[in-house]
Amino acid sequence: MASTTEQTVVENEVEQIGLLNGVEDFYEGITVEIEEHMDSHVFVPLLRASISKWKNQGKRGVWIKLPIEFSNLVHHIVQEGFRYHHAEADYLMLVRWLPNTPDTLPVNASHRVGIGAFILNKKRQVLVVQEKSGGFKGTGVWKLPTGVVNEGEDICEAAVREVKEETGIDAEFMEILAFRQSHRSFFSKSDLFFVCMLRPNSFEIHKQDSEVEAAQWMEMEEYVNQPYNKEHKLFQYVAEICELKSQGGYVGFSAISTATDSDQNTYLYFNGSDFTKI
Amino acid sequence: MASTTEQTVVENEVEQIGLLNGVEDFYEGITVEIEEHMDSHVFVPLLRASISKWKNQGKRGVWIKLPIEFSNLVHHIVQEGFRYHHAEADYLMLVRWLPNTPDTLPVNASHRVGIGAFILNKKRQVLVVQEKSGGFKGTGVWKLPTGVVNEGEDICEAAVREVKEETGIDAEFMEILAFRQSHRSFFSKSDLFFVCMLRPNSFEIHKQDSEVEAAQWMEMEEYVNQPYNKEHKLFQYVAEICELKSQGGYVGFSAISTATDSDQNTYLYFNGSDFTKI
């Protein structure tokens, strides 16, 4: 990580210890990604010299992305005034705000996002599953296929993927019928769950053995009238919204791509039935 | 952290080193929260003995919640086979899956959630602001008041709070008009942004000096026809949805509480105009 910038050529003890290389951002911040093992007695002087330089340059947020294999440095970085920002399985992101002003650093991700898929066949039967694990294991409740939206995945795309994985049915996204926000679903994190209407392009079920105990096309009325749905307000609402939709009497939000960058999608979801201007 | 369970009474060297106290969960998991400073030469034998016991008990996920002040242990916990799960400013959560099966541990939070607030006064003027920082700084673009949904906060509640903070206007939540999902908004995290319609209960603007450069009630047409909105597809859609709503020609999703636990809200958002059954 020691730089070979012009500064290191200067005959100066301080400069010769080198500096950490960082990538600047649009918010007067700098991000350093540690890419090789360093002992703390090598790293700490580098970090101190770098921070001194960044302070003089008017930098504000200093980010250190530290892969888990270099966890030997965590304690030392914390001792230099850094706090945690977020972590994934394989790295920890630490941050320090340099100015003497309240920090305006972006917040950590706060929500997990899931989907449930409502799919009808031509007989107005709904695609339902029983799960092998989780809260519904062994209850006999038939429920919509559900799943977690992967990192970087569009909600509409996740619904199609989960249905294919769990039941083998090919389907396409039509509408978001409803969504629910709940809190403390996992430690302090919140949860957003989107009920998606899909249109099937195939009808023969091939269930996933690892997660799904059983899968079938079920009469709409039978699905709605399950005792569990009747006893749980949220499930009752969702079931009745699905029933209303199956009768053609409900409009959800459809999706339109508003991406400007071809590398990644940005979808806007809204009531397309009311919207004919653009 | 050393337990005083019956086991420690047994005259046995191994038992006498004690075990970590953990809280069991419904998924055969156990969570240990470190509450006091320990040197690694004390902690590591405790952890090893505890893992041995938990393996025998058939435990699956072992979670260690480690406050940042005890960051001296991070490296040692990683060396015992743990990976990071998530981190907040003041703690790091590490996890290890004990069985020889693929892990079914819950995923980390993947999305940040924001709101924009659409508010009309009785003259059909829209409440708009210019921001002091961020991407719109210095552009002269008038935009809806926006903000980040706090941890544990309901979307409908966040919209009301942000409007009050930025403009001093008291308002109540009416509907979600649309929402947008985008990716890689911050490192690998995604972003959900909900456009909320609010009804004002006061009309005199008292702008927040720290974040807001200017705030005003603006003619709807003037807001919609700003060049920036015309040049950006997403902004054009949102502006035109707001215009349509201002003319009474658009239905979004309203919110209903489906909470079963009085301590925390769970809201379902859906098209209430189509839904009169419950």
Image (cartoon, coloured by chain):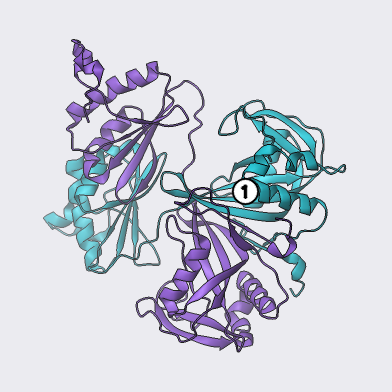
Chain colours: A purple, B cyan
Task: Pick whichever, A189 or B192, lies toward us.
Answer: B192
Kindly identify which residue carries mark 1: B233
Residue B230 in the image: state x and y as whole percent: 67, 43
List the single residue furthest toward the top: A11
- In the image, residue A159 sits, relative to residue B182, either above or below, namely below
**Residue at point 20%, 38% (across, down):** A36
Left or right: B14, with B20 as reference point: left
Left or right: B113, with A22 as reference point: right
**Residue at point 22%, 58% (across, down):** B51
Left or right: A235, with A135 as reference point: right
Q: Is residue A188 visible?
A: no
Residue A236 in the image: state x and y as whole percent: 64, 74
Q: Residues within 10 Å of mark 1 (few under 14, many from 20)?
A: some
Task: Pick whichever, B181 or A84, lies toward us.
Answer: B181
| Quadrant position of residue B28 | bottom left
Residue B97 in the image: state x and y as whole percent: 28, 61
The C terminus of chain B sits in image quarter = bottom right
- In the image, residue A202 sits, relative to residue A278, either above or below, namely below
- In the image, residue B167 sits, relative to residue B160, either above or below, namely above
List the single residue furthest toward the right: B123
Residue B237 in the image: state x and y as whole percent: 67, 51
Amino acid on which disc 1 is placed: Lys
| Quadrant position of residue A248 | bottom right
Task: Pick whichever, B255 or B193, lies toward us.
Answer: B193
List the single residue furthest toward the left: B13
Q: What is the total number of numbered labels drawn onto the structure image?
A: 1
